[in-house]
Image (spheres, helix red, strand yellow):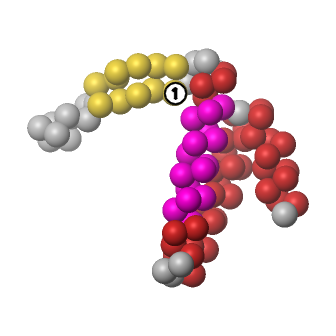
């Protein structure tokens, strides 16, 4: 089972443990969180491509890695990964 945790790291904490705010196991919320992470990474790649092609290429490699890893846990992303590889 995949679980998403929301953690709070107090600014005053020097190497202290984070405080868990919430834990989610809802499949639809996990799917949306995974999609959001990928969308954010894609947005960064788009911005980087206007400034530095090398950094943009590294970011696209990170997007591919995210898709591969997250698709193992979020079945909905498997079909999206297949489409992304085909394009």
User: Seen in the image, is 13 located left or right of residue 18?
Assistant: left
Residue at far left of view: 12
In the rendered image, the vertical position of residue 80 relative to residue 73, given as above or below:
below
Q: Position of residue 26 (x, y in %)?
A: 61, 18
Is 48 contained in the magenta span?
A: no
Q: Position of residue 67 (x, y in %)?
A: 69, 49
Residue at far right of view: 86
Q: Nearer the viewer, residue 22 or 43?
A: 43
Residue 14 visible from this viewpoint: yes
User: Seen in the image, is 75 located left or right of residue 49?
Assistant: right
Q: Nearer the viewer, residue 73 or 39?
A: 39
Q: Which residues are magenta?
A: 31-45
Residue matched to label 1? 4
Q: Quadrant of residue 16?
A: top left
Residue drawn at x 88%, y 60% as measured from the top left? 86
Count the marks: 1
Location of the N terminus by quadrant is: top right
Q: Position of residue 80 (x, y in %)?
A: 79, 46
SS category of the residue bearing label 1: strand
Residue drawn at x 78%, y 49% as measured from the top left? 81
Is 41 contained in the magenta span?
A: yes
Residue 58 visible from this viewpoint: no
User: Seen in the image, is 24 located left or right of residue 18?
Assistant: right
Location of the C terminus by quadrant is: bottom right
Q: Residues within 10 Å of mark 1 (few under 14, many from 20)?
A: some
Q: Nearer the viewer, residue 31 or 68?
A: 31
Q: Quadrant of residue 32?
A: top right
Q: Position of residue 30 (x, y in %)?
A: 61, 28
Residue drawn at x 51%, y 27% as measured from the top left? 4
Magenta stretch secondary structure, dominant? helix
Residue drawn at x 85%, y 53% as measured from the top left? 83
């Amino acid at each position: 089972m995949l679980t998403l945790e929301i953690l709070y790291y107090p600014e005053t904490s020097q190497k202290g443990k984070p405080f868990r705010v919430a834990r989610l196991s809802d499949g639809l919320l996990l799917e949306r969180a995974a999609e959001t992470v990928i969308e954010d990474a894609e947005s960064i790649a788009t911005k980087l491509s206007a400034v530095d092609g090398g950094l943009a290429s590294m970011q696209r490699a990170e997007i591919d890695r995210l898709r591969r890893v997250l698709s193992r846990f979020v079945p909905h992303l498997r079909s999206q990964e297949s489409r992304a590889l085909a394009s």
